[in-house]
Amino acid sequence: MIAKMPRIVFVVLYLLAVAGVSLGVWRVATQVGLGQLAARAQADLALSSDRLTGQLQRYRDLAVNMADHPQVTRVLAGAVQPEDVALLRRVADRTAAQDVIVVDLTGRVMAAAEDGTLAQGARPFVQRALNGALGRGYGPATGGVPRSYFYAAPVFDRQSRVLGAIVVATDLSSVEYAWRSDTAAVFFRDASGRVQVSNRSELVGWRRPAGGLGLQPAEGPAPAFSAHVEAGFEIWRLGWGRYLPDEALHLARDLPVIGMTGEVLSDVAPVRRLALSQAAAVAALCLALGALLFLATERRRTLARANAQLEARVAERTRALSETNAALRREVTERRQAQDALARAQDELVQASRLSALGQLSAGISHELNQPLMAVQSFAENGRAFLERGQAERAGENLGRISDMAHRMGRIIKNLRAFSKQESVAQTQVDLTGVIAAALELTQARRETLGVTLDYSAPDGPVWVRGGEVRLGQVFVNLITNALDAMAEVEERRLILTVQTGAQVTVTLADTGPGIAQAERIFDPFYSTKEVGAAKGIGLGLSISYAIVQSMGGELRARNGKTGAEFTVTLNAATAEAAA
């Protein structure tokens, strides 16, 4: 229990600190929210005040302008005509005025757009106009008479004497009708404290109690109300109905131009909710951090206890790993030696495959060399006979033919020597068309024996690639030989060889044979499609060719084409300048 006490004390202190921080966040968030709400409320009140002032001042301008109208002067002179009344009615209809009235110096109605009865409620303002000043004010709201706002303008003659007044009345209920969709509750009080205009109809007619705050209805008990100051703002608590907030921020603004005071009530509930949610978020974050800290502390204690056990195990494992490391080093050395032996074996297999291909080509090469040798013998005998006859020119022609045959035999022997030579793995720039020409020449006798038609398409001039000339020659001799073997038992024998250049050089070799039975295994070592016991190969040719092309950074692919098997060799291109 004693060991657990520090933890409990720490938890209690931390919870108290979280509560204090959350309370501070709530107060700050409330102050900031009330400030923002006050700014919005001030803007709403200014907008409503400007809108009301603008709407009422339209009628003031109407009264002033109508006071200078000649028909109004004629009416006050006692000559009222039907067109004068029609004028007043048109003005009232077009301006949405409640009534437009012309009164003389005695206050008698001379003409009106309606019945002129509203002039009775406007007597104080009419009297001010008859004294030569602009009058304005409110009319009665009892006895079925609507709330009215009056502007009375004096009518002067040419000697600036007052002849009478023109009164323009407007219904305040029609002015406030367009505001009822506004969010904030706005109302306007007159000098006596009575609410004249509001976007909440239930507040119209309420009065400000003498020397107090809030509003009270003209009849009936006063509703619940209290006020206090919070963060420098006046907050009202209301019980005035469901269309008014229970708690609202109150702001006021004097409007001397129309003789009113504008006030706004903005709901404080969203500010309270936002401040509470921010405080709750901070509390949750602090509690989460505290929980993580507590778990980290407990984990650290657990790790400290486990650390001693781990150190002993680590020491034991270190000895075991040292022994394993030594064994691995020995195994790595053995693997390297095995890899070196494998590389040597692969080189020997490549050379053996090359010599095997030479053995397969030997019959055709013997035939290829036998023909030039017989021709040389025949041309030599003919040349001697021509010399005996004294025909030196004909003898020279035979000697030239003997020289051509010697060049042909030398070229065949050169290709054979290059093909059988063991080439190093160093890569240079090689003319691919020359390599293919040499491979075609080595397999020419076999092609002629089988009656194979060659379709060869290549760009003009050399095509430079990176690789080894001898090893590339072995690849193409192997591919061509396999194609010839595949077409040995078919009627149509055609070899299609195409060279395409670009960022990489692609050589496509297709035949008209039976195709490949298992294309996915064609490059596996010792896999062969030839008849067992045919002594035509051991299944290493294509595997070695694949490895040769891979070592040059290229790719060898096989698939079944439209006519038979199709092999594609892709090599990296080299520029002619680099080759030079």
Image (cartoon, rainbow, N blue to C red):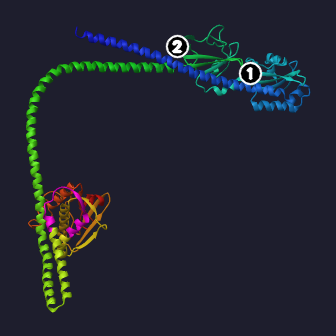
In reply to whether residue 321 is colored magenta, the answer given is no
Question: Residue 571: which quarter of the image?
Answer: bottom left
Q: Give the range drawn in magenta.
A: 416-440
Q: Horizontally, is 342 left or right of 277 in the view?
A: left
Q: Residue at x 60, y 21 (%)?
A: 42
Q: Residue 175, labelled with which disc?
A: none
Q: Residue at x 75, y 30 (%)?
A: 95
For residue 113, say whether it is visible.
no
Spatial CA span between label 1 and label 2: 40 Å
**Percent position (x, y) of residue 455?**
27, 71
Type of the residue with mark 1: Ser
Q: Which of 41 and 244 is in front in this view?
A: 41
For residue 212, say whether it is visible.
yes
Q: Horizontally, is 503 left or right of 410 in the view?
A: right
Label 1–label 2 contact, CB within 8 A: no
Q: Horizontally, is 550 left or right of 106 in the view?
A: left
Label whose residue precedes the other's in the sequence (1 or 2) = 1
Say what secondary structure mark 2 lies in: loop
Q: Which residue is drawn at 66% across and 15% down?
A: 206
Type of the residue with mark 2: Ala
